[in-house]
Image (tube, rainbow, N blue to C red):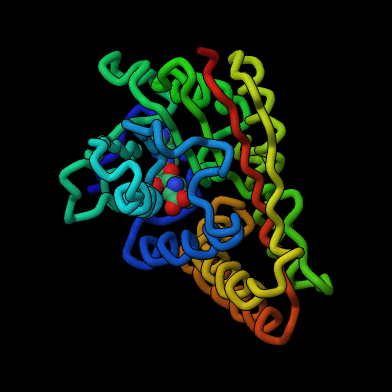
Amino acid sequence: MESTQENTEEVYLFNRNDFEKQRLNKQHELLVSLCDGNLLHPSIPKDAIGKLAEVGTGSGIWLDDIATVLGSDIESFSMKREYAGFDISAVHFPANLRPDTQYIVHDILEPFPSEFHNLYDVVHIRLMVLALKKDDIQTAAANVAALLKPGGFFQWEEIETRDLSFSPPSEITSKVKGIMRDLSMASGLTNTPSIEIERAFKELGLVDVIVEDYNSNRRPDLTSGVAEWTKAGAKAALFYAILRGQTVRNEEEARSESAELWEAYAAEIDGGVVPSLPLKMILGKKAS
Ligand SMILES: C[S@@+](CC[C@H](N)C(=O)[O-])C[C@H]1O[C@@H](n2cnc3c(N)ncnc32)[C@H](O)[C@@H]1O
């Protein structure tokens, strides 16, 4: 049995198993390359970061990387830093913990315990668009912003699923995109997360709010990485999407329909159809 909070209706589309952990870790490398190698946006001053939290941390790969990068910075070498990773499930938390990092099971839709309030110089969220309903984004942003010290930075990256594209488009790629879109809409998710997050940041009174646009369409060097990424994502999500989409009678039918569709999808990508990875980074700062 997974360790998750029990009071949240799970809309999250992905499984929590070894394949998924590896997929998240591989995806991390691709996303960091897409963001020009920056784990944190260049506008966030690194020297002053003492405490940093990530919510929806999954395997903690981003947190682990940022701890390594900040720790190897000669100028701030002697500074003692602390990291916290929160997630609704402990399943992907790393087995070997760094001494400066703690992992905590917590649902983003519930207020964090007050001991964590006004504590962090930076809070980070990445890829929760398939786990958060559109109407819950404001609550999630408010709960996470409460963790920030005055003057602290909030960085949130999401895939703008509306902008996923294929060149050239085909019947199969349109079908896969359509299945995911229909399920997202039926589940109350959003396909324009950056718009909702930017609005939430502004309503919370965060300042210096900006939205950065990173799209692999402008990065031919990432074409093969994005092709592998979309195939792994489709493999992980299609079964659940088809099962929950209620066009099949049982799990067996969902399994065979998703396997057949995935084979066709993968063949098109391998055959030269170029998918995009449209990432948006939303940045804001808690007023001092
Ligand atoms: C797609 S993964 C992204 C993981 C990580 N942020 C990354 O970029 O590698 C989404 C994560 O959000 C977590 N999650 C889903 N619903 C959540 C909730 N209500 N509160 C906190 N975490 C949640 C999932 O367990 C999963 O680890």
Asked if residue 59 can be seen in this view, the reply is no
Residue at the extreme front of the image, as rendered: 75
Q: Residue at 28% across / 45% down in the picture? A: 77
Q: Residue at 69% across / 37% down in the picture? A: 211
Residue 261: x %, y % from top left: 63, 74
Q: Quadrant of residue 35?
A: bottom right
Tally the numbered discs: 0
Q: Residue at 71% across / 73% down in the picture? A: 220
Q: Nearer the viewer, residue 256 or 15?
A: 15
Asked if residue 283 can be seen in this view, the reply is yes
Q: Quadrant of residue 188?
A: top right
Relative placement, left or right, of 16 versus 128 is: left
Relative placement, left or right, of 163 versus 248 is: right
Task: Please say if 253 is above or below 208.
Answer: below
Relative placement, left or right, of 68 versus 189 is: left
Task: Please say if 73 is above or below 269.
Answer: above
Q: Quadrant of residue 219?
A: bottom right
Q: Nearer the viewer, residue 149 or 30?
A: 149
Residue 88: x %, y % from top left: 34, 37
Residue 210: x %, y % from top left: 68, 32
Residue 54: x %, y % from top left: 39, 38
Task: Please say if 41 is above or below 140.
Answer: below
Relative placement, left or right, of 232 versus 115 is: right
Q: Nearer the viewer, residue 246 or 168?
A: 168
